[in-house]
Image (tube, rainbow, N blue to C red):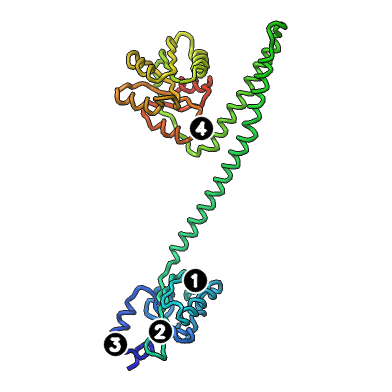
Amino acid sequence: MDGFFGLTLENELFKKDTFYQAVVNNFYDAIYVLDDNNSIIYANHSVKKILGMEPGEMLGKHLIDFIHPDDAPKVQQILADIKKGKQTYIVGEYKIKHRDNKWLWMQSSYYKLFSNETTEAIVVSNVDITEKKLLERKLKEIREQLAILQNKSLSEYALVTSAKLRAPLSNILGLSNLLHDFSPDEGTDFQNLKTLLLNLQQQAEKLDKVIYDINSIVSTNVIKGNAIAMDKKIEHIVLIDDEPVANLIHEKVISKAIPDGQLKVISSFTTPEEAFAYIQRIPPDLIFLDIDMPKIGAWEFLQRMEKNNLNIDVIIISSSINPADREKAMAFPAVKNFFNKPLRMEDIEDILNR
């Protein structure tokens, strides 16, 4: 008895065409069977759901007639490998034409079906993966765009660090060498000295601006500060930095920026342990805190403040331009803002005018 494939099948169950066709036609996958010439001799009902064609429209036509020209060689190779017996099961992806002349991506499984010694056929099961392919292409485009942006940022970063950063730094080194050569014994030309110091300051300001530019290149997120209460008077400030020169500079800047008579005490500490013991005894109105310090860094210092219920406003001042440091700092409720060193007059004014 001939089965509906046109093949002689020995199994009694599969001799019942109606049963076998009912099973195959209820598959969601589009299934068709190819003869020795790769012509379609059977197609199930899902062909219409997926490709928009009646099964009868495909019968007698060569499979390659429906395949995209770019993918035809790949499909022909799969069919050849199946026939030569290199493999009895192959999975491939290719584009196939819909009735509306649009191209759909299919993931197809090819099986070699034997019925007797003289007759063979190839069963092809197809799953529509067009949506998956569109998503993959979109993800690829996004990755490419991100790579372009990343490369652009890295190029800008390299330009700034190699040229713009080096220029003011070399000028500062040159000016400091000239200052070093001044000899009191030869008589001090105060005007020339003042000019040198002014030039040194200008180059330092250029260097500072470059650091801020680097920060803007590296950081893509703007982390806003937590506002300090407007009606709060700042009379007592504590500076915590393991570099004495940083404390000295910031003390001068703060004293100059805060109106006369308002600021009463500035306490400077180079060791966080000593500073923490002090603020427990005499809580200040505001703390300026460096990030990287020996033994106790800013994060541990802030955690200790929370554990001891020390509700004191903190401003982070750091040389770090890492956006992650800024984001981590602003996660602490006590931290009201984050400034890069050196602290400037406008930074203090920004704090006071909130």
- Residue 114: x and y in percent read 38, 85
- Residue 105: x and y in percent read 47, 69
**Foreground label between 2 and 3:** 3
Residue 276 visible in rendering: yes
Mark 2 vs mark 3, CA separation in Å: 19 Å
Q: Quadrant of the C terminus?
A: top left
Mark 4 vs mark 2, CA separation in Å: 67 Å
Marks 3 and 1 close (CB-CB < 8 Å): no
Residue type marked 2: Tyr
Residue 42: image tag: 2
Camera-nearest residue between 339 and 322: 322
Judged from the image, the secondary structure of the residue bearing numbered disc 1 is strand
Marks 2 and 3 close (CB-CB < 8 Å): no
Residue 11: image tag: 3
Q: Are there few (<14), some (14-19), or many (20+) residues within 10 Å of tag 2?
A: some
Q: Residue at coordinates 62% horizontally, 20% vertically from top-left?
A: 201
Precedes in sequence: disc 4 or disc 3: 3
**Foreground label between 4 and 1:** 4
Precedes in sequence: disc 1 or disc 2: 2
- Residue 278: x and y in percent read 36, 15
Q: Residue at coordinates 55% horizontally, 30% vertically from top-left?
A: 212
Q: Quadrant of the N terminus?
A: bottom left
Q: Are there few (<14), some (14-19), or many (20+) residues within 10 Å of tag 4?
A: many
Residue type marked 4: Ile
Judged from the image, the secondary structure of the residue bearing numbered disc 2 is strand
Q: Residue at coordinates 42% horizontally, 19% vertically from top-left?
A: 271
Q: Which residue is mark 4?
A: 321
- Residue 21: x and y in percent read 32, 83
Question: Which of the 4 image quadrants contains residue 110?
Answer: bottom left
Q: Which residue is mark 1?
A: 95
Q: Are there few (<14), some (14-19), or many (20+) residues within 10 Å of tag 1?
A: many
Camera-nearest residue between 225 and 213: 213
